[in-house]
Amino acid sequence: MGRYIGPVCRLCRREGRKLFLKGEKCLSPKCPFERRPYPPGQHGRMAARLRRGRESDYARQLRAKQQAKRIYGVSERQFRRYFDVAQQARGLTGQVLLQLLETRLDNVVYRLGFARSRREARQLVTHGHFTVNGRRTDIPSYQVRPGDVIAVREGSRNRTFFREIIPAWAEGQKVPDWLERDLDNLSGRVLRLPERGDIDTQVDEQLIVEFYSR
């Protein structure tokens, strides 16, 4: 299955919570989820009423997996691959899974405040606007490591987007403790791998583990 290219606000409504997929719009009164906090479709309101208090264990596990997959913008095949890697690694599988998702290059660009959403970050990375340790990198799924320096490419810094829009947006965004940002130079450094307490994504990773362990 290819990447979802439809209206992302429908995904938030389907999951019954904000996934913050559209940056500034998600924080404004114009957010569709604020106006229609029920599943999309002809029978959305009815489905929301019927669903209350009647979810099975499988439904809760599925929703947790879908939420994580949609928040980080990865395909089903990619997500399963991340889970398989996490399962073979040392540590708690669920936490390692979130750690792998957090250290994707597109997510790091978003966490540093250099993009207003993960979808925008993925597009900027794909278009070659960022470097990792001085080398142009256009792979959103690139896994960063402690010590890596992520920066806006020299040839992109004079663009209005990076010169005016991003600095204004980034000033209001808190950078997690495992990252360090130099806003003047539009760069950031990975200080260490994120721990569970550093990840504010509201996903129950244990339910994901249970889903794949059925």
Image (cartoon, rainbow, N blue to C red):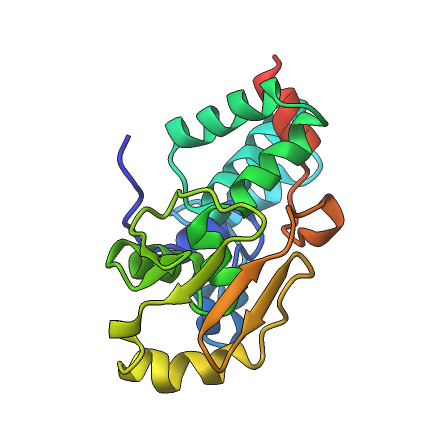
Q: Quarter of the image holding residue 9? A: bottom left
**Residue drawn at x 46%, y 31% as measured from the top left:** 79
Q: Quarter of the image holding residue 22? A: bottom left
**Residue drawn at x 68%, y 35% as measured from the top left:** 95
Residue furthest right as drawn: 197
Residue furthest top as drawn: 214
Q: Quadrant of the C terminus?
A: top right
Relative depth, front residue between 35 and 126: 126
Residue 151, percent across and down?
41, 66
User: In this rendering, would 119 be left or right of 169?
Assistant: left
Can residue 45 be seen at all in this image of the molecule? Answer: yes
Residue 143, percent across and down?
46, 42
Q: Quarter of the image holding residue 61? A: top right
Q: Quadrant of the N terminus?
A: top left
User: In this rendering, would 208 be left or right of 125?
Assistant: right
Relative depth, front residue between 198 and 64: 198
* Relative height, residue 146 to residue 165 (above, below): above
**Residue drawn at x 41%, y 52% as measured from the top left:** 10
Can residue 54 be seen at all in this image of the molecule? Answer: no
Image mark count: 0
Relative depth, front residue between 97 and 6: 97
User: In this rendering, would 21 be left or right of 207?
Assistant: left
* Relative height, residue 196 to residue 91 (above, below): below
Residue 74, percent across and down?
41, 40
* Relative height, residue 122 to residue 78 (above, below): below
Relative depth, front residue between 79 and 152: 152
**Residue drawn at x 46%, y 44% as measured from the top left:** 70
Residue 130, percent across and down?
34, 61
